[in-house]
Image (tube, helix red, strand yellow):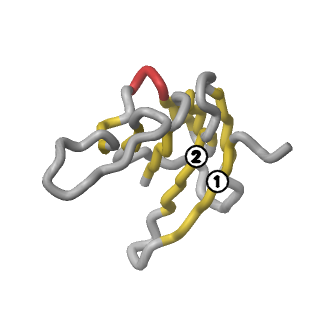
Amino acid sequence: MFPVVSAGTTVDDQRFINISLANVYLTNSRRVAITIKSGKTSYVVSSAQVITGPATATNDYGQAEKVYIQALPSSSCSASGRSLQVTLLSKSVPCWS
């Protein structure tokens, strides 16, 4: 069995933290809590997007997009201090910075 949610984090040249999560579960959403351990007392989510589409979808040149980027609904994400909570839709890859 493999993890249904995977994660990656980067810090860009402006020192912004970028968090990417992937929920590969085909039918269920997942609630995830993240705590950033650092000297800062709080963080602000400046943007949140999600990449999603049907499980077998691909984007082909010259065809309508089936996998697309959209804003992550604010009801799916909350931040407080160093903590972030998010509900990941099935088959989704949300990203924050």
In this orientation, does residue 58 appear?
yes
Q: Position of residue 63 (x, y in %)?
A: 17, 47
- Do the residues under discs 1 and 2 have CB atoms within 8 angstroms? yes
Q: Position of residue 55 (x, y in %)?
A: 49, 36
Residue at image coords 52%, 28%: 89
Q: Is residue 82 above or below residue 15?
A: above
* Mark 1 nearby-residue class (10 Å; few <14, some 14–19, many ≥20): few
**Type of the residue with mark 1:** Ala
Asked which secondary structure carries label 2, the reply is strand
Viewer-nearest residue: 97 or 28: 28
Viewer-nearest residue: 78 or 88: 88
Viewer-nearest residue: 4 or 82: 4
Q: Residue furthest right?
A: 1
Task: Answer left or right for 65 relative to 79.
Answer: left
- Residue 62's tag is none
Q: Residue furthest left?
A: 62
In this orientation, does residue 48 appear?
no
Q: CA distance from mark 1 to mark 2?
A: 6 Å
Task: Answer left or right for 72 relative to 64.
Answer: right
Asked which secondary structure carries label 1, the reply is strand
Q: Earlier in the sequence, mark 1 or mark 2?
A: 1
Tell me the quadrant of the picture where the C terminus can be found: bottom left
* Foreground tag (1 vs 2): 2
* Mark 2 nearby-residue class (10 Å; few <14, some 14–19, many ≥20): many
**Disc 1 designates what residue?**
7
Residue at image coords 80%, 47%: 2
Q: Position of residue 13 (x, y in %)?
A: 41, 79
Q: Position of residue 71 (x, y in %)?
A: 31, 37
Residue at image coords 58%, 40%: 81
Tell me the quadrant of the picture where the N terminus can be found: top right
**Disc 2 designates what residue?**
22
**Type of the residue with mark 2:** Ala
